[in-house]
Amino acid sequence: MQKQILLFTIIIHSLVHTTSLWELALNYQKQEYFGEAIHCYELLLEQEPYNTQACFNLGCCYLALGQGYKAMELFDRIDAIPARYNSAYTRKTIGLLDEAIELYTKIIDDCPTYEPAQLALGFAYLTQGNFERGWRQHTRYLKQSGKNGDKLRILLKHNNLEGKTVLLTPEGGLGDTLQFIRYAERLHTLGAYVIVIAQKPLISLLSRCPYIDMLLTSADPVPIYDAHATLMSLPAIFNDNEDTFPRTIPYLFADNTLVNEWKEKLAHDTHYKVGICWAADVKNDESRLPIARRGCPLHMFAPLNNLENVSFYSLQKYDGIEEIHTLPNSFRLTHYPDLDEHCAPFEDTAALIKNMDLIITVDTAIAHLAGGLGCTVWLLLPYATDWRWIYNRTDSPWYPTMRIFKQQKPFDWESVIEAIHRDVLTEI
């Protein structure tokens, strides 16, 4: 009955506003009213059963809502490469990695120039933990995008880095830089003079990394160098796997003076101290499907309030702060509005993290900062995740102090928080 009422409402809206059903569906989809868009597309397909674009869009809406098998059924009706690609991506999203790889491979066999499949195949292998095939496949993208680091590869092949100057530049967000800056230490150990260009907010934090010989922003003049690579290309350039990833921990360092200041500031709190970060960078999530959105609404943390002798501290800055009012008044969350305001970005944050017993965070820069500092960090992941978090694993080859808590169903933060609650009890 409810569906019939919604369909009737959609039809009336279409008639009254002289908007075609197709336009209405597209508008709902664009605004992420996926339920309404689904009803529009279903009604449209009743009228036009062979409308492949409506079928494709309907599959995209189901995928956005985490209904993978419905999405696959729709994509599989369409004999077109974009639909086959989406079918493969859907299989990867729900964990059918072998099937996804098979489909990506078939697409490439039929159309080798279809670059989305070429790139996705490499990421599928990496998500599977098959780094040998993953990096080999990913090299195609690196070559086409000018990120293959050819000169660095030659120097490495001939073991000729001693005295050479290597320039490393950022790629991706702040968290990506924090994760892959560890490769600067390997290059430095091999005898290279390492110049790093980093995002301005990270300059102060990275200035304490002894393996960076020169640290610059993008506005600074760059000296002459022998080889260049982006930070995110380095695992592929080194052809690393789980056994060879750089795992020297810590490789990031907090300011000792600030660490001691925060230690004194928190001396009154003898409870088990947990730092939490719940909102990912909104700008990075705008283009992601809802099932891949990384933020966990703060009110989902409310069940942790009954943990005795536990204090919670906010590591959140900017986006997400407005959610604090959604917690019960009894929730013991300490928030410092001036965090990092009297020093450089991430400096207070790093020092505060060093004074925590545990960090619980979504997939954002805080996770990489805590892992790089060598602190105990529990990472909360959505149903659809990035390649760096290997499928069906609760640990990370990148961070030995990290544990992973991943949604087993789309949008199911409840069970993730239940697992966190249970496991915190074993820690305190």
Image: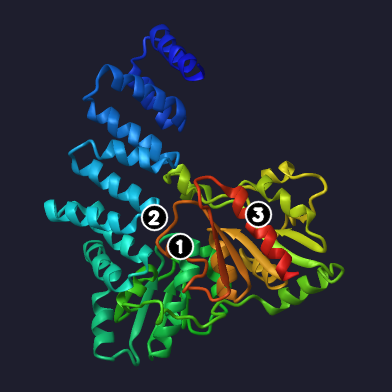
Q: Looking at the image, can residue 228 be seen?
A: yes
Query: Where's the C terminus, which quadrant?
Result: bottom right
Residue density around tag 3, few if under 14, some if 14–19, many if 20 or more, within 10 Å: some
**Could you say whether the residue bearing mark 3 is in a helix, strand or loop?**
helix
Q: Residues within 10 Å of mark 1 (few under 14, many from 20)?
A: few
Residue 273: percent from left, percent from top: 75, 66
Q: Which of 258 and 352 lies nearest the eye of the viewer?
A: 352
Q: For the residue marked with disc 1, what is the amino acid?
A: Asn
Residue highlighted by disc 3: 418
Residue furthest right in the image: 268
In the rendered structure, which disc, 3 or 2, sits on the residue that comes first in sequence?
A: 2
The residue positioned 84% from the left and 71% from the top of the image is 267
Mark 2 touching mark 1, by CB under 8 A?
A: yes
Image coordinates of residue 345 in percent, x first then y, are 61, 63
What amino acid is at disc 3?
Answer: Glu
Question: Which image quadrant is residue 250 in?
Answer: bottom right
Amino acid type indicated by mark 2 = Gly
Q: Residue at x 54, y 62 (%)?
A: 365
Position above or below: 11 against 66: above
Q: Element type at marker 1? A: loop
| Label 2 sits on residue | 95
Which residue is label 1 attached to? 392
Instruction: Decide: is 55 above or below 120.
Output: above
Q: Residue at x 72, y 50 (%)?
A: 303
Q: Position of residue 6 (x, y in %)?
A: 47, 17
For residue 377, which quarter of the picture? bottom right
Q: CA distance from mark 1 to mark 3?
A: 18 Å
